[in-house]
Image (cartoon, helix red, strand yellow):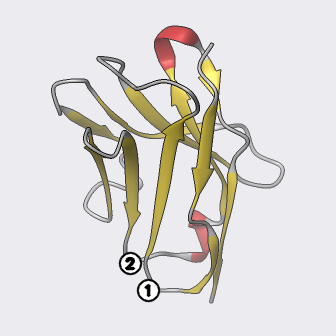
Amino acid sequence: QVQLVESGGGLVQAGGSLRLSCAPSGRTFGTYDVGWYRQAPGKEREFVARISWSGSTYYAGSVKGRFTISRDSAKNTVYLHLNTLKPEDTAIYYCNVPITNSWGQGTQVTVSS
């Protein structure tokens, strides 16, 4: 297990932007793939984006072109840049390391219309 800490959520108007951060506690990401998921009220958790250790990126169709996942190895942090936000992006966003099935505590993103 890897302890993950997310930050950067908040309240933003539609069309606005946020940057979410995810960092492991007490270790580095190393060569792990890292992903972001989200869960809206009353809905199941869904995949948002993933970045491989080599920098390859994958996105859900609903966010492609609006969200960007990146990693800064020097800062040991993975970012999710959320642009052109829509009210339907409102959810708790979770960081994930698939190979260890580790999850962070989540950070709330609320987009007002």
Q: Quadrant of the C terminus?
A: bottom right
Residue 29: image location, x then y, percent? 39, 25
Q: Who's the residue at 48% across and 54% down the image?
A: 21
Task: Say few, some or many: other residues with alpha carbon within 10 Å of mark 1 (under 14 / 14 to 19 / 20 or more).
Answer: some
User: What amino acid is found at the position of numbered circle 2 in the picture?
Assistant: Thr
Q: Is residue 84 above or below residue 40?
A: below
Label 1 SS:
loop
Tell which residue pokes out farthest to the front in this image: 26
Q: Quadrant of the N terminus?
A: top right
User: What amino acid is found at the position of numbered circle 1 in the picture?
Assistant: Gly
Label 2 SS:
loop
Residue 17: image location, x then y, percent? 43, 78
Q: Who's the residue at 25% across and 61% down the image?
A: 65
Q: Which mark is residue 84?
A: 2
Q: Which mark is residue 15?
A: 1
Label 1 to label 2, Cα distance in Å? 4 Å
- Left or right of residue 77: residue 26: right
Residue 113 shows in this picture:
yes
Q: Who's the residue at 33% across and 46% down the image?
A: 75
Query: Mark 1–mark 2 contact, CB under 8 Å?
Result: yes
Q: Is residue 58 above or below residue 15?
A: above
Question: What is the total number of numbered labels drawn onto the structure image?
Answer: 2
- Left or right of residue 60: residue 94: right
Q: Which image quadrant for residue 92?
A: bottom right
Residue 15: image location, x then y, percent? 44, 86
Residue 79: image location, x then y, percent? 38, 52
- Left or right of residue 24: residue 69: left
